[in-house]
Amino acid sequence: MDYLCGTRRRRPSDDDVVGEWFVLGSLVPMDRLLEELSKGQVLSKVKSPTKLLQRKFFLDHRNMIVHYEGSQKKLREPKNEIRISKIREVREGEKDYSKKLQGLDKSLCLAVVMGANHKVVYLMAQRQEIRDMWLRGLRYAIQKDKLAEQRNETDRWVREAFNMADRNGDGALDFEEVMKLLKKLNADLKKEYVKQMFDKADTNKSTKSKAVLDRNEFVNFYHALTQRPELEEIFLRYTRGKAYLTVRDLLSFLREAQRMMDADEETCRTFIQTHEPHSVMKQRDQMSIQGFRVFLSSDKQQLFNPEHSRVYQDMQRPMTHYLIASSHNTYLSEDQLKGPSKVEAYIAALTKGCRCVELDCWDGPDDEPIIYHGYTLTSKILFRDVIMAIKDYAFKASPYPLTLSLENHCSIDQQKVMAKHLTEILGDILWYPEGELDHTPTPHELKNRILIKGKTLASTRLKGKKLPTTNHDNDDVSDEEDGEGDVNENTEQKEQGKSSGHKHIKLCQELSRITGMTSVGFKDPEQAATSGGLLAIYSLGESKIEKLLQTVAAGINKVSHSKLLRIYPAGSRTDSSNYNPVPMWNHGCQVVALNYQTGSEPMQLNHGRFMDNGNSGYILKPNFLLSEEMFGIVNGTVTRSNMSKVLKILIISGYQIPKPKDSEKGEIIDPFVKIEVHGVSSDSKENRTKTIDNNGFNPRWHEVFTFNIRVPELAILRFVVKDEDRGKDDFIGYYSLPFTSLQEGYRHFPLFDKHGDQFSQTVIFAHISIQNAQNA
């Protein structure tokens, strides 16, 4: 029996599936709790602190839907439904980042966070035990949904499609309804063939007044209809005339096709026991075609090397030796002129593995600093709320250090408030040096710590010792616009500075003291490489870095050996678009900041780049990016033997490719796959398959593409699936990954939508071959 922890007595933790739920002192099993919630309870939708809409909510745990009755008790409508699979998180009302619960009893409230845009629905119960029942019930339903997805994703997806097609709710579909459903599922199949399979699947003819398929029959029909002949061809090639694979057959497949040279017979037996669904076959150490399909779809057989889904790189090198996943204007969820600023935008970036977020800080009312895009119509959020959310989510995706990049436009008084919030809210997880550093910290040393990036005062770093007053040509603490000017003195000595003819930056001691990463003005590569301290960072706009890479590329790379370089988008990108981050990474720039809310090609490359090393947000740079002598590998002036590769990609087939979101109802897509290599200029190429007309369900391409890769350590592959159209081809999905994370052999890979969320069930099937260039 499954139980979950209640709030009266919690053991072992809120997040454990196995636990107990107590109501009025008695133990209630989770299935009883779910049944209770399925009967419906009155909750209020919180539109604002003064606008509460009472609705009756039901948790349908069998169909994994939360639905509620409208104000007129109308029939259930799609807009009144929340699919459990769409819920990202259920939070207690205490964590209210939007201020919708201001003045309400937060112990009665909960927040349901949904979808790619982190839309939040706030609910309020009449009693705390009712709130807690929904809190635990929803969390349990989310876990149960994930478990069902892992165990039997295909059947769940098919049954869900069946339920949507069964409009009258009688549990059956006739042939015409099946044909409509197949078309909706993007399968444009010949009617005669479907009818033949339909009749074969209709096994209970004698008990029916007309030919229909019930739910179970439709599942069987669907499986028969969607056989994977491309997998059967591979299977039969290795069975040597039998109807199954033996241990030795499977071993041959692993070594010859999958290039798993360390596999042995024990490995094969383990795979059979894990993936073969038929118990008799398991007992005989044999793998059926069904087991083979499950095996090839398993995580370890995917295109992305599963060893790279954990942290495997050396994390005890200086921070400057890593590429760091970084966000620009993190608070924005849309454009940079009048779009909304959201605390949720920080949560979204952090849950994607981002390790450097930006806070544009300005004076706010009531002595509370605010965050927004200055001098624009973007909305404003409280600095304090952002720090609270960051504390909660900083290390959910990665334990490695998080940097808060402060764009500080605040007065001295509100800077002191900022410093107070940072120290009080973050407490011991806030890191900063007490004196001068004797070495550059490593990601390992700073695990689960937060650093502040910003301007500092020299006197706060020298344990009370003061440096001579220095000239300044900047009166702003912000370090964007290329951060001209150094900072050495406290503004509280401003009058003294004026009398001696100096201009001083506006920065308070309290904020300077807790700043761990010092922003320094960039003048030229020689100056930058030799100044600034051990944890210095230089901020450069995209236009400036592009010019520098054209004129002094080696100099920029030399700076990145011992200093951090932060790159950010041009101010003219008011639509929150992004630049191409690859050239900056290729030259060693570590903190290449992108607008995370904009799901275009640059963010898709960022996604692929940082999938590596366990999505930790830190990627160790190749050694040649840390050597003046070897940097010529990037531009081709230095060559290496046995390092250039020939990559051959056979795009075989696709499976359940969805229609573009904006496509017309009932439209059948014409998919093609584009393959791109992004890396050093000599490696950057692209190609595409032919178009398959009228079949997004199981298109087959079977086309080979060859790419010569001179610098594999810097190459990123991006696969894009589009729907060919007379006008502009419609984007459907993408998949990106580093060349070094490829697995050879027959591999599946998923597709992600433009927001970076993975499509359920959708895969592309390919074969990968990698050879040394001189042996190809």
Image (cartoon, rainbow, N blue to C red):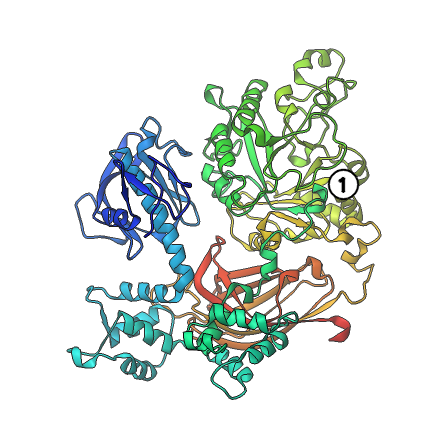
Q: Residue at x 18, y 49 (%)?
A: 74
Q: Quadrant of residue 641?
A: bottom right
Give coordinates of residue 259: x percent, y percent.
64, 72
Give coordinates of residue 383: x percent, y percent.
50, 29
- 701 with respect to 512 (left or right): left
Q: Is residue 739 visible?
A: yes
Q: Is residue 746 visible?
A: no
Q: Residue at x 67, y 22 (%)?
A: 505
Give coordinates of residue 408: x percent, y percent.
59, 28
Q: Residues within 10 Å of mark 1 (few under 14, many from 20)?
A: many
Residue that numbered label 1 is attached to:
562
Residue 316 to residue 7: above or below: below
Give coordinates of residue 323: x percent, y percent.
66, 47
Residue 27 to residue 376: above or below: below
In the image, 738 versus 33, the foreground residue is: 33
For badge 1, the amino acid type reads Ser
